[in-house]
Image (spheres, grey):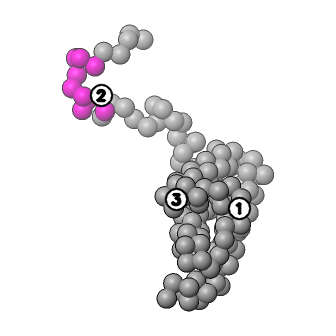
Amino acid sequence: MPPFDPAPCAFGQVVRDLQLHDIVPSDAVQPTNHRDVALFWTASAILILNVLDGVLTLTAVHAGAATEANPLMAASLDWGGVWFMVLKIALVSFCVLLLWRARNRLLAACGLVGLCLVYATVIAYHASGLDVVASHLI
C-alpha cells in the first residue's frame, strides 16, 4: 500500500472516503440479532440511568440531604460537580463498553442486565427520597 498523501485530493474527499467500518468491525458496534438489540437497549438504559443517578446525587448532596455512598465518587465530589459527573460517566461508560464487546458471553450479558436492574433500584431509591431533598432545597 502506498503511503498516504493527502495532496492530490481535497480534505473533504479524505473525510468522505473514511468510513466507520474501515476502523471498527460492524458486528462490534451494531446489534445483529434480537438478543443483541435487547442488550443494546439495556446498555443504553444503563448510560441514561447513570446520568440521572449523577444528577440526583449531586442535587441531594448539595442540598445537604444525603451523602455519596461510593468512596471513590465521594472523593471526586471534592473536585466539584463537573468532575464528579465526568468521572462517573467515563467509568460507567467504559464498563458498559467492555460488557457490550463481550456480550456474546453469558456472564457479560447477565452483567448488563444486572447492572441495569441495580441502576433502576438506585433511581427508585432516589425517587423515594425526593420529598426530603425538596424540603432541604426550600
Q: Residues within 10 Å of mark 1 (few under 14, many from 20)?
A: few
For disc 1, the marked residue is 70
Of residues 112 and 94, the one nearer the viewer is 94
Assign a secondary structure to mark 3: loop
Q: Residue at x 55, y 55 (%)?
A: 79
- Furthest residue in direction right, as rendered: 107
User: Disc 1 marks which amino acid?
Assistant: Asn
Judged from the image, the secondary structure of the residue bearing numbered disc 2 is helix
Instruction: Give the residue number, with chain letter if any, for mark 2.
Output: 14
In magenta stretch: residue 2? no
Give the distance between the C-alpha atoms of the residues marked 1 and 3, in whole angstroms: 16 Å
Span colored in magenta: 6-15
Q: Please, what secondary structure does the residue beneath circle 1 have?
A: loop
- The spot of residue 28 in percent (x, y) is 58, 42
- The image quarter containing residue 57 is bottom right
| Residue under label 3 | 80
Which of the two labelled residues, at mark 2 and mark 1, occupies the earlier sequence position? 2
Count of labels shown?
A: 3
Task: Between residue 124 and residue 87, name the one nearer to us.
Answer: 87
Whole-number angstrom distance, CA of label 2 to CA of label 1 = 46 Å
